[in-house]
Image (spheres, rainbow, N blue to C red):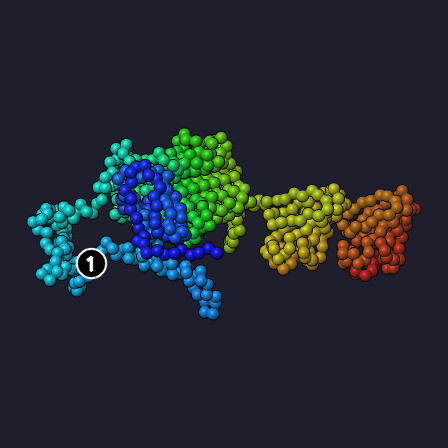
């Protein structure tokens, strides 16, 4: 049996002074999961570049860094947990020791964390009775220092004479005078934390410390070398002076990681890294972030949106404006999820550009591997090397992706837009296809809509409702069938031109319940006597029966109301007559209305089908002898007694007989001698 963590009486924090060579550091207190351990360099939190071992062990564990922290950096390992209740005990249910032990362990760990937070606090001496603990009002203490009066209570103390006189006043009505110190505090630069920006010095820690201390950090012009990820958290802003503010790495890292929500990355040049800009939730959702006027160069993947492995940390509603992804080696912009989290949804890319600029790109300019609900790309350009898989690719997990005013360019038959099998409801409006590959390479089975996009047909509508349509020319997507046996139709075509030249053929309509409001037409186009029988899959057929097409150009048009198929148009085409010259037995197949028979070569028996045969019920046919011989044409019935209960004989030229079946017997309607 696995024991629960024993919670020792220990402060959940330890510090080390790095020596530049040590890469493994111990933490002597238990943690429940690796996410509970915070790793800091000189107070700046680190989110990557290390491995945590020992989660769940009472004695603690170790942190192993990929690269040893630089000398004289203070490495802090601290347990920081989110306070939450993990277990509900049901009235009358099982009361497991493991559950209560785990809950108590969390409580003790939380108390230790609160106790640790209180250690560095200012507080009254234990032997002193506490007095006033409230600060003076904001307007009273503004621009002043905190002091203590004769009773030892906090008061606001004027700084006059202790620092520079107030000497900054903005131009304009209503401007107030502020001290230089106050004014300079508005604006924090990474250089305020020791960044050099000379293209040689490692400025990683300066960025991390600046962002740990302030929500808005400015990056002046310069080239800043970093070896660790720059994390931009909730509500933070990291902005530069444009392309002259360059953050550069030669390491295989995520260069800039937007880990939370409502953050802003602007006017910067990013160079190198495994990923230039990554958006994924670290401790919560990654939503409503903005990346504006940023370029990323020579990253394996320029921009990565990752839904991760936790549905509670989605990657939604992020905005990218005027972003350049230059020389990506794998993908320019990539949307996916690396675990069981939610797909990146409803993200917006406006006036963005992916440009290989001669770099060998092995993936795609834009790859929506997984993403749903209107990830949109507006006024976007993709220009990639001929080694790419596609300019734009929608993967199997892509759902409802929108492209508006998309420009694609490549060579070597690279497709402009590739739709993988499984991608659905892609919408493409105004596509300029400058690559020599397919304009739209569709493997999705038609699961897309296009307007002024694709080649040779610019527009493709899916299921559409139109209340008033004027059409100058209609073209029908027609299916041609030449077969025998049984063919089952689907809903991909309305018009079916069918040849039964190779043998009798049954054409099976879809079940009416699966084809509500659908219209289908089946037409026989061959001259053979082989019958085409129209039936219904799992149903009774058009007009509640099977339908038979026997003559060339016979057709039937049908519509489903969701319950059954109805015949709305048919024909007995001109010349619906069959001619036959022979002897022996000739079966009347009911495919035509008039049979002109010659018995010149010998006695000929014209054998009607049984009166109760489906093709016979209600049908009327005329049989006429056409030759001058004395050989009779005998009109009989298969398995029955014949018209009016007898075999009828046509013995002279031009004699004819017209018969009809009521489903039980054949009856003579007229006879001409």
Is residue 98 at least partly visible in the picture? yes
Q: Foreground: 509 or 411?
A: 411
Q: x and y percent of residue 127 in the render?
A: 17, 62
Q: Is residue 425 left or right of residue 590?
A: left
Q: Residue at x 33, y 46 (%)?
A: 39
Q: Residue at x 84, y 47 (%)?
A: 586
Q: Considering only vertical position in the picture, is 302 above or below 541?
A: above
> Which residue was labeled with disc 1?
123
Q: x and y percent of residue 532 in the render?
A: 72, 48
Circle 1: element type: loop
Q: Residue at x 43, y 31 (%)?
A: 360
Q: Is residue 7 left or right of residue 451?
A: left
Determine the residue located farthest toward the bottom in the rendered image: 92
Is residue 355 at least partly visible in the picture? no
Q: Is residue 420 left or right of residue 578?
A: left
What is the crowding at mark 1: few (fewer than 14 residues within 10 Å), some, or many (at least 20)? Answer: few
Number of marks in picture? 1
Q: x and y percent of residue 224 in the render?
A: 28, 36
Q: Considering only vertical position in the picture, is 634 above or below 394?
A: below
Q: Residue at x 68, y 51 (%)?
A: 508
Determine the residue located farthest toward the right in the rendered image: 630
Determine the residue located farthest toward the left in the rendered image: 161
Q: Foreground: 179 or 5?
A: 5
Q: Foreground: 515 or 340?
A: 340
Q: x and y percent of residue 661 in the render?
A: 80, 58
Q: Foreground: 147 or 170?
A: 147
């Amino acid at each position: 049996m696995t024991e629960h963590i024993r919670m020792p009486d220990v402060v959940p924090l330890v510090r080390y002074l790095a020596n530049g060579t040590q890469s493994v550091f111990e933490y002597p207190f238990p943690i429940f999961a690796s996410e509970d351990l915070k790793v800091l360099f000189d107070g700046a939190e680190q989110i990557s570049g290390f491995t945590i071992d020992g989660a769940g062990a009472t004695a603690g564990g170790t942190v192993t860094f990929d690269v040893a922290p630089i000398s004289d950096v203070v490495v802090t390992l601290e347990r920081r947990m989110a306070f939450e209740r993990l277990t509900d005990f049901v009235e009358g249910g099982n009361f497991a020791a493991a559950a209560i032990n785990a809950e108590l362990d969390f409580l003790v760990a939380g108390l230790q964390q609160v106790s640790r937070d209180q250690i560095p606090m200012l507080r009254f001496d234990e032997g002193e009775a506490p007095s006033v603990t409230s600060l003076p009002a904001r307007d009273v203490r503004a621009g002043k220092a905190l002091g203590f009066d004769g009773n030892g209570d906090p008061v606001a103390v004027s700084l006059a004479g202790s620092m520079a006189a107030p000497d900054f006043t903005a131009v304009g009505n209503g401007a107030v005078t502020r001290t230089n110190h106050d004014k300079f505090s508005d604006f924090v630069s990474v250089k305020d934390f020791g960044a050099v920006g000379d293209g040689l010095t490692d400025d990683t820690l300066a960025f991390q410390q600046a962002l740990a201390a302030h929500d808005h950090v400015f990056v002046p012009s310069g080239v800043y070398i970093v070896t660790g990820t720059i994390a931009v958290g909730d509500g933070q802003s990291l902005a530069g002076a444009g392309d002259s503010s360059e953050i550069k790495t030669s390491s295989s890292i995520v260069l800039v990681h937007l880990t939370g929500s409502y953050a802003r990355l602007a006017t910067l040049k990013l160079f190198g890294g495994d990923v230039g800009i990554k958006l994924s939730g670290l401790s919560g959702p990654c939503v409503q972030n903005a990346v504006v006027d940023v370029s990323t160069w020579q990253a394996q993947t320029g921009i990565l949106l990752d839904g991760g492995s936790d549905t509670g940390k989605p990657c939604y509603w992020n905005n990218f404006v005027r972003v350049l992804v230059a020389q990506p080696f794998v993908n320019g912009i990539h949307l996916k999820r690396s675990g069981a989290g939610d797909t990146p949804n409803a993200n917006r890319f406006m006036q963005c550009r992916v440009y290989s600029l001669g770099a060998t790109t092995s993936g795609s300019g834009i790859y929506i591997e997984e993403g749903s609900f209107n990830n949109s790309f507006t006024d976007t350009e993709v220009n990639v090397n001929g080694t790419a898989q596609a300019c734009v690719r929608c993967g199997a997990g892509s759902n409802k992706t929108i492209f508006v005013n998309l420009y694609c360019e490549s060579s070597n038959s690279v497709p402009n837009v590739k739709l993988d099998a499984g991608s659905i409801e892609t919408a493409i409006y105004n596509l300029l296809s400058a690559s020599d590959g397919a304009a739209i390479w569709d493997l999705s089975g038609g699961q897309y809509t296009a307007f002024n996009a694709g080649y040779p047909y610019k527009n493709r509508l899916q299921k559409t409702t139109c209340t008033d349509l004027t059409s100058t020319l209609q073209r029908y997507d027609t299916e041609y069938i030449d077969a025998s046996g049984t063919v089952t139709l689907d809903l991909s075509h309305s018009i079916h031109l069918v040849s039964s030249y190779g043998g009798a053929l049954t054409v099976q309509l879809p079940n009416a319940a699966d084809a509500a409001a659908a219209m289908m037409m089946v037409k026989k186009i061959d001259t053979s006597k082989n019958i085409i029988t129209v039936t219904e899959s799992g149903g009774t057929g058009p007009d509640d029966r099977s339908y038979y097409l026997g003559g060339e150009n016979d057709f039937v048009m049908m519509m489903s109301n969701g319950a059954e198929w109805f015949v709305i148009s048919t024909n007995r085409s001109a010349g619906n007559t069959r001619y036959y010259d022979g002897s022996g037995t000739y079966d009347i197949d009911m495919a035509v209305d008039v049979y002109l028979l010659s018995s010149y070569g010998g006695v000929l028996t014209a054998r009607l089908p049984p009166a109760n045969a489906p093709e016979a019920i209600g049908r009327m046919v005329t049989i006429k002898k056409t030759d001058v011989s004395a050989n009779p044409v005998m009109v009989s019935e298969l398995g029955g007694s014949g018209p009016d209960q007898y075999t009828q004989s046509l013995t002279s030229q031009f004699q004819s007989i017209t018969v009809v079946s009521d489903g039980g017997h054949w009856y003579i309607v007229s006879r001409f001698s």
